[in-house]
Image: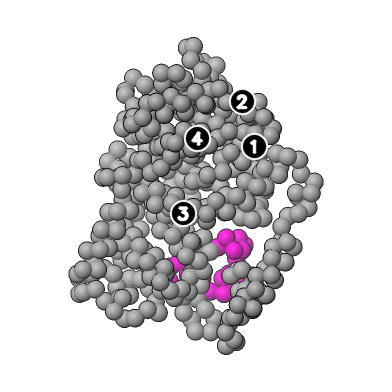
């Protein structure tokens, strides 16, 4: 609604929004959505194509319905880019250098200000319009109005920017503040978008830095290797050394990692690529979904099958596409690719969060883990019903924030720093 309002109108009038007018605006927007719903695609689509369309639609819907993922996503990004001593960052620009260049702050100072900004936005839509006392916390505090202005300006767009955006309303995911046309004041588009900024801000700061400075795919390639190192760190935490190994690279393409449990062998193919932003919306760009499938699933399937053939043991083999992409609709993704997931019921898509929960369950609750493995091994998919790893974990009561706790709870680390800054 914010996007359509900006594209179709201006803010020079002084009329006050009433309940009746709000209802009219909502109905107008529903009409707009119906006109831009890709109904022609759905009308002629087969069942897998309908699931593919639903994947893009539900990706966005599910993100908004449960924002608990934002805390874990923040901690995971922080751990990989800053916190872990097990992950090499020699190939990338230090995130502290980037935040210093853009905002004059360290990464921790930047995230502390973003968390305070998130709180301000929970109180009012114009985070710079609060009482002066909310910006004054002592001479040495980093929580200043000046620092907040730097951050908000970086993440703001004008009406003209919105109207010319090639990605249309998806622009708000990277720029959740809009400068009003009349008063030139920044207002947030949605509280949800600011919370998502907190979750993924560090990752996108460095990725955008590479893009804007003509460094090409340097960060994307380096992050793929860092993702592998994160997998190895998880294995070291939750598994014994003899249970897993990285599969050596050979002339024949193969999976990335081999993990052997008591009742099954898991083969993992890691994919750090992300779904295109235009695919994550109510009327998704199906071509971007196809590109994501091709790069992260279809091509990788052959590698998993090759490693399965080379396994000489007797245990059942479970093949996993392990994604860094944070999504809770993997069941719908699998339903949209029946040629893989219906034909091979021991092949699954797993997100990195799913893996964290599964490994923590193995270490802390062996009985639950045995139920998880049994369900994955005996599962039989069909065109009408596909089972995901997340679905199995839910059924076995093996979900929750199990990994980013205690020393790895980076959200709490930043929250405590904010509390100290408020006391200065």
- Label 4 vs label 2: CA separation? 16 Å
Give the quadrant of the C terminus.
bottom left
Q: Residue at x 61, y 68 (%)?
A: 1
**Can you say whether 301 is above or below 138 in the image?**
above
* Disc 1: CA contacts within 10 A as few (<14), some (14-19) or many (>=20): many
Question: Quick one: label 3 or label 1, which is nearer the N terminus?
Answer: 3
**Can you say whether 308 is above or below 282 in the image?**
above
Residue at the disc numbered 1? 335
Question: Quick one: label 3 or label 4, which is nearer the N terminus?
Answer: 3
* Disc 3: CA contacts within 10 A as few (<14), some (14-19) or many (>=20): some
* Disc 4: CA contacts within 10 A as few (<14), some (14-19) or many (>=20): some
Residue at the disc numbered 4? 395
**Can you say whether 420 is above or below 17 in the image?**
above
Q: Dot 4 lies on which element?
A: helix
In the image, which residues are magenta? 151-171
- Label 3 vs label 1: CA separation? 24 Å
Residue at the disc numbered 3? 67
* Disc 2: CA contacts within 10 A as few (<14), some (14-19) or many (>=20): some
Residue at the disc numbered 2? 380
């Amino acid at each position: 609604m914010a996007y359509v309002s900006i594209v179709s109108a201006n803010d020079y009038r002084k009329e006050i929004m009433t309940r009746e007018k709000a209802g009219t605006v909502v109905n107008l927007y529903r009409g707009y959505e119906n006109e831009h719903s890709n109904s022609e695609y759905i009308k002629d689509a087969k069942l897998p194509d309908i699931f593919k369309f639903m994947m893009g639609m539900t990706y966005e819907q599910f993100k908004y319905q449960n924002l608990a993922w934002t805390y874990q996503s923040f901690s995971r990004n922080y751990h990989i880019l800053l916190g872990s001593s097990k992950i090499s960052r020699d190939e990338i620009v230090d995130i502290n250098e980037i935040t210093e260049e853009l905002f004059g702050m360290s990464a921790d100072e930047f995230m502390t200000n973003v968390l305070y900004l998130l709180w301000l936005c929970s109180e009012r839509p114009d985070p710079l319009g609060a009482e002066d006392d909310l910006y004054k916390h002592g001479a040495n505090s980093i929580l200043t109005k000046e620092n907040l202005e730097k951050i908000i300006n970086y993440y703001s767009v004008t009406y003209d920017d919105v109207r010319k955006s090639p990605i249309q309303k998806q622009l708000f995911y990277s720029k959740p503040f809009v400068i009003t046309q009349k008063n030139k004041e920044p207002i947030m588009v949605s509280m949800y978008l600011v919370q998502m900024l907190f979750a993924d801000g560090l990752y996108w700061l460095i990725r955008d830095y590479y893009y804007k400075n003509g460094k090409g795919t340097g960060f994307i390639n380096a992050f793929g290797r860092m993702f592998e190192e994160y997998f190895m760190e998880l294995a070291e935490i939750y598994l014994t050394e003899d249970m897993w190994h990285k599969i050596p690279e050979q002339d024949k393409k193969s999976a990335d990692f081999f993990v052997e449990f008591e009742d099954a062998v898991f083969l993992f193919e890691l994919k750090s690529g992300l779904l295109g932003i235009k695919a994550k919306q109510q009327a998704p760009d199906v071509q971007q979904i196809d590109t994501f499938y091709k790069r992260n699933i279809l091509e990788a399937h052959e590698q998993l099958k090759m490693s399965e053939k080379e396994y000489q043991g007797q245990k059942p083999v479970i093949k996993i596409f392990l994604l860094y992409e944070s999504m809770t609709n993997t069941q719908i993704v699998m339903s949209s690719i029946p040629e893989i997931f219906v034909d091979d019921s021991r092949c699954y898509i797993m997100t990195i969060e799913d893996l964290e929960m599964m490994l923590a369950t193995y270490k802390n609750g062996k009985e639950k883990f045995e139920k998880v493995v049994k369900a994955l091994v005996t599962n039989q998919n069909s065109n009408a019903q596909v089972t995901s790893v997340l679905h199995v974990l839910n059924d076995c009561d093996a979900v929750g924030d199990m990994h980013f706790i205690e020393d790895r709870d980076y959200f709490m680390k930043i929250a405590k720093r904010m509390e100290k800054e408020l006391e200065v």
